[in-house]
Image (spheres, rainbow, N blue to C red):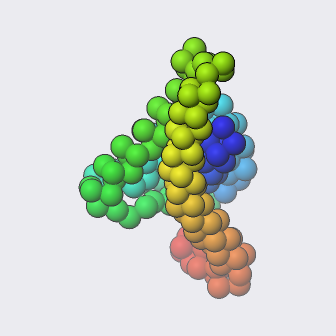
Amino acid sequence: MVLFQQLEQLLKFIVANGRISGYASELENIKAKQVARINNQTMGQLVGQYIESANPDNGENSSEPEEITEAYISFNFRIDSDSVFYETKKEGLARLVSERNELVHHLLPRFDTSSAKSCKELGKKLDDQSEMIRKEILETKAIANALHEVRKELAIFLNSDEGKKQFELSFL
């Protein structure tokens, strides 16, 4: 369960921080609402949103308003992939969600605590499951770290003299 929760926390970070857009004066409020909404989602919902960031057929349009009255910022972190990667990742994550739900909701009715054989079978299944989850956690952690670094570099640039200059020039 701890491994599933680690993966879920990484997914929440990526989904909550991978995309934001709005007027500069509203970004803090938009971000807070986005985090609150994402914190109440199931792992299945998070996986669905996360995997769409790698969908090569996802032709997302800009959410920029036609008339800009103040500084408008839009940030979208995407995973560049082909359809094979996308489908493989989608199936793998769906399998993990299914296994997580099975573990949380259906383990006890099928598990015989008085049987050594049942305990050994469960131990083997959990060990195998642990390997899959740990692999996914490592991959997802690398993506979360990349997202964190990109956001940090963007903030540094926007707060630099050059960033401020470019921002002002964009209004001219």
Confirm whether residue 61 shows in the render. no
Q: Position of residue 163 (x, y in %)?
A: 64, 79
Q: Is residue 20 above or below residue 122?
A: below
Indicate whether 16 appears above or below 98: below
In percent of the image, x 43 and y 61: which residue is there? 79
- Residue displayed at 72% across by 50% down: 28
Q: Nearer the viewer, residue 167 or 100?
A: 100
Q: Is residue 82 left or right of residue 22?
A: left
Give x and y (percent) for residue 114: 66, 18
Q: Quadrant of residue 56?
A: bottom left
Where is the N terminus found, in terms of image quarters? top right
Seen at 57% across and 54% down, the residue is 134
Left or right? Give the position of 128 relative to 38: left
Taking the image as drawn, is residue 102 in sight? Answer: yes
User: Which quadrant of the structure image shows residue 95?
Assistant: top left
- Residue closer to the observer: 53 or 44: 44
Q: Locate residue 166: give its quadrant.
A: bottom right
The residue shown at (57%, 61%) is 138
Question: In the current view of this chain or complex, which residue is farthest to the top?
Answer: 109
Q: Residue furthest front?
A: 116
Query: If the image is split into quadrants, where does the C terminus sit?
Result: bottom right
